[in-house]
Image (tube, rainbow, N blue to C red):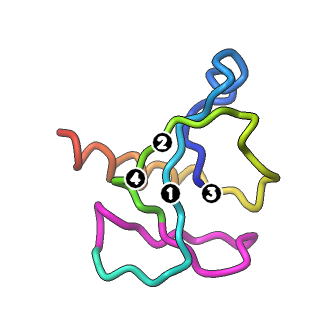
Amino acid sequence: MLVISHDVFNERSGTVIALALTSQTQRVGVPLALKIASTTLPKPSWVKISQIRTLSTERLGKRLGRISPEGLNVVIEGLFELVA
């Protein structure tokens, strides 16, 4: 999961807003799936922008990686394309 909500929201609500991640090569392109660049993820990964979830912070495991601010902006732009 790629958590996109702010830390303050996460702490106060006890939930996070997250998008699904997959390591399976995606045939659909932006904005439905976006390949993300991360030096810390074990495999090449895609964000499935159309699969947004709200999860309890208790369900989260350890952090595997971090997306750059620029990468997060691309994901947010993809979300705007879906809803605008």
Q: Which residue is mark 4?
A: 51
Q: State yes or no: discs 2 and 1 in contact (Cβ < 8 Å).
A: yes
Q: Residue at (59%, 54%) from the top-left corner?
A: 1
Labels 4 and 2 touching (C-beta < 8 A):
yes
Magenta highlight: main SS: loop
From which residue to which does the magenta span run?
29-46
Q: Residue at x 41, y 55 (%)?
A: 74
Please give the residue where the numbered disc 2 appears in the rendered image.
53
- Residue 80 vertical placement versus 50 (above, below): above
In-image side of 66 versus 77 (left or right): right
Q: Residues within 10 Å of mark 1 (few under 14, many from 20)?
A: some
Residue at 71%, 41% in the rendered image:
59
Query: Is residue 53 part of the magenta span, yes or no?
Result: no
Q: Locate the C terminus and report the quarter of the image it occupies.
A: top left
Position of residue 8 measured from the top left corner of the image (x, y, whole percent) = 68, 21
Q: Position of residue 38 (x, y in %)?
A: 65, 69
Percent x, y of residue 49: 38, 55
Labels 4, 3: front one: 4
Q: Give the residue at mark 3.
A: 67
Q: Nearer the viewer, mark 1 or mark 3?
A: 1
The correct choice, above or below, for 2 with respect to 16 in the image is: below
- The answer to which of marks 4 and 3 sits earlier in the sequence is 4
Which one is earlier in the sequence, the residue at label 2 or at label 1?
A: 1
Question: On the image, which quarter does residue 56 sit in?
Answer: top right
Q: Amino acid at mark 4?
A: Gln
* Label disc, if present, on residue 20 of the rendered structure: 1
Drawn side of residue 67 relative to residue 51, left or right: right
Disc 2/disc 1 C-alpha distance (Å)? 8 Å
State the CA–CA distance, disc 4 to disc 3: 18 Å
Q: Residues within 10 Å of mark 4 (few under 14, many from 20)?
A: few
